[in-house]
Image: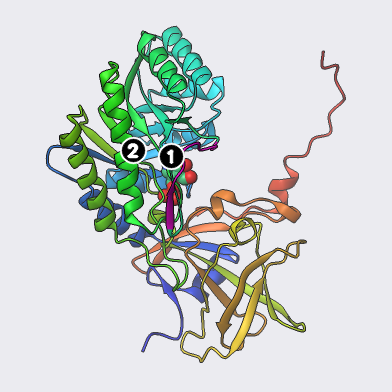
Amino acid sequence: MKEDVLHIGGVSAPALAQHFGTPLIVYDEDALRKRLTEYLDAFRAPGLETRVVYAGKAFLCGAMAKLVANAGASLDVVSGGELACALNAGFPAARIVFHGNNKTPDELRAAVEAGVGAVVVDNLPECEALAAIAAEKKRAMRVLLRVNPGVEAHTHKYIITAHPDSKFGVSVSRPEELYAVLGAMQAAEFLYFDGFHAHIGSQIFDKAAFAAEAAALAALAEDAQKRGFAPRVFDLGGGFAAWYTDEDAPIPVAEACETILAACKAEKEKRGLALEEVWIEPGRSIAGEAGTTLYTVGWQKDTEHRHYVFVDGGMADNIRPALYEAKYSCDAAEKMNEPKTVKTTVAGKCGESGDIVIDSVMLPPVEAGDLLAVYTTGAYCYSMASNYNHLGRPAVVFAGGGKARQVLRRETPRDLLALEVEEEAVECD
Ligand SMILES: Cc1ncc(COP(=O)(O)O)c(C=O)c1O
């Protein structure tokens, strides 16, 4: 029988809550390391260089950047802020991949000055701006082109779309545009075209989607090679699913890696590609399941159709249910063995009816002061958190080996008030 009290990284949930308060996001540090290592070990194939690039958008802070660096993985950043966070933590710039569809000139300059390992160029004007900055700084930059391969995977199915309308990248269905960007890269003295990047969706359960993505990139690469743009890198992005509820069956890491590498190798041989390196960018699959949010139960309410349990957080620390109807699982963290007899709606404390953490879950009877543990909140929760209703963002702790350390402190009303200024109006023109 499991323990009646939930432990994370060897620390009991009540001890964590008492020490750090709630809502609290707790990462099992060993689980983070284990998953990173699993990717790094599985994503290898003779004859191909490989890189596992953790997608920092899932969750990033200095401690996370250090953990990723120490594991030996690379890091994907999408803004000057994420770049600054990584560099501040001492993350090696050469292992940083800079993404984004609208990087500002300042962000491009910061990336060039830092000497990031690669910039993933999204569009022609961005390419021209980067070329100019790299020339001005006389810094050679490796660039990949983000392409939209016409493969879209969302949850269980993937589809081939002829005319994707995504805001990201250049579509393979628009070859003129695509080759205009490659031409601009080639013409730029300080840019070195390295290869293609694609990202086909998130929470992907179907490994055939990744094989289809590799095939689409390979078909493009064959054509590009004939035109004198031989890509040596394929970066297949992220999208590897995580477990949120028992409806989810993520592809085992080793299987996903094997599928991608086998498809890339087969395409390389079949088409005689100059391909040398394959990269992937898992975010959710590394950070998601390692994170758990602890909430304290407040009041409860019955309506015609629901039994509400209110918690001391909600859409400000986890926007995903409101944004995507994302589903979660939870437990009463001190009543792990009690029969789950109450059909419950877990709702947050924000001023929105859509502020529902879990629409329907079976729980034991709970009372005010009990702890709820919502699982798999390690990805896209803290990183998407807001100060809606002037709520401070939760503290984040890393727990392991029976100890816990705070890596991000809780925001307080004082932090929010510190942003306020009372300045004299100035002439702006
Ligand atoms: C370019 C890119 N790479 C990687 C990721 C990470 O995706 P996931 O967390 O689903 O693995 C994303 C997510 O949006 C992305 O846009």
Residue 194 quadrant:
top left
Left or right: residue 231 compared with residue 374? left
Magenta-drawn stretch contains 162: yes
**Labels 2 and 1 touching (C-beta < 8 A):** yes
* Residue 393 x %, y %: 62, 54
Residue 265 vertical placement versus 184 (above, below): below
**Residue 105 shows which numbered tag?**
none
Q: Quadrant of ligand 1?
A: top left
Look at the numbered disc 1 and give the secondary structure of its residue.
loop
Distance (Cα) linking label 2 and label 1: 8 Å
Residue that mark 1 sits on: 150
Look at the numbered disc 2 and give the secondary structure of its residue.
helix
Residue 121 quadrant:
top left
Q: In the picture, which quadrant includes the N terminus? A: bottom left
Residue that mark 2 sits on: 216
Left or right: residue 177 compared with residue 357? left
Camera-side residue of 68 and 412: 68
Left or right: residue 397 compared with residue 225? right
Camera-side residue of 212 and 292: 212
The residues colored magenta run 157-166
Camera-side residue of 420 and 209: 209
Residue 377 vertical placement versus 384 (above, below): below
Q: Label 1 is placed on what type of residue?
A: Gly
* Residue 330 x %, y %: 52, 74
Q: In the picture, which quadrant includes the C terminus? A: top right
Callout 1: few (<14), some (14-19), or many (20+) C-alpha neighbours within 10 Å? many
